[in-house]
Image (cartoon, rainbow, N blue to C red):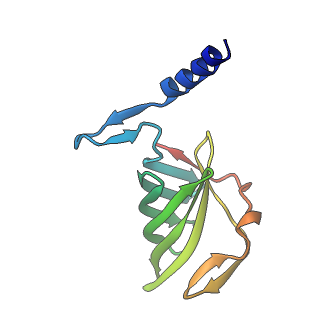
Amino acid sequence: MGFVFKGFFFMLGLTGLVVGCNSSGSIEQKNSLAGDYLFLSEGDTISLALQQQKDSVFGELKYAFSGKDRNVGKINGTLKDSLITGDYSFVSEGVPSVRQVVFRVTDQGLVEGYGEIEESNGKMIFSDKDHLSFDHGMILQRK
């Protein structure tokens, strides 16, 4: 009886795993984070065109805040424990920069984390990633 019960949950878990084939015939998960995300409010815009290959994520990230310079660049990172952690390489006022970004994956969309930063090896990184704030209300929703 115990074997049948465990087998039922194992099979239930397998049926919950949704996979498909892309045009090249390789298997990829249907619940991928790949897609276009947008936050828009009172002249402030954050947009992210995200691609995913297994635990790697990359794409184009744009910030356009009212009264501030627009930033357009590339994000390259990893997905682990519902957090996207990566480097954002961008140009602002003609100056190339790199800073660390962290997005929490939620049911509503992606929420960027904020916290104290410091410079390390030519890029800005979070001083303590374990104490980031995700409560600012700017949710990038999938389009």
Instruction: From the viewer's side, name the closer residue of 10 and 57.
Output: 10
Outermost residue on the top side: it is 1
Q: Position of 39 compared to 19: left or right?
A: right
**Which image quarter is the N terminus in?**
top right
- Work out whether 35 lies above or below 66: above
Q: Is residue 110 visible?
A: yes
Instruction: From the viewer's side, name the closer residue of 98 and 85.
Output: 85
Outermost residue on the left side: it is 24
Where is residue 7? Give x, y as percent.
58, 20
Residue 113, image quadrant: bottom right
Instruction: From the viewer's side, name the closer residue of 111 and 56.
Output: 56
Outermost residue on the right side: it is 131
What's the residue at 49%, 43% (across, down)?
Answer: 142
Where is residue 91? Give x, y as percent.
44, 79
Q: Is residue 67 visible?
A: no
Where is residue 9? Give x, y as percent.
60, 22
- Work out whether 54 lies above or below 127: above
Where is residue 52? Give x, y as percent.
42, 52
- Work out whether 88 lies above or below 79: below
Q: Position of 110 compared to 73: left or right?
A: right
What's the residue at 44%, 51% (across, down)?
Answer: 54
What's the residue at 42%, 68% (across, down)?
Answer: 74
What's the residue at 58%, 72% (across, down)?
Answer: 100
Q: Position of 8 compared to 19: left or right?
A: right
Residue 72, image quadrant: bottom left
Question: Total of numbered circles in the picture?
Answer: 0
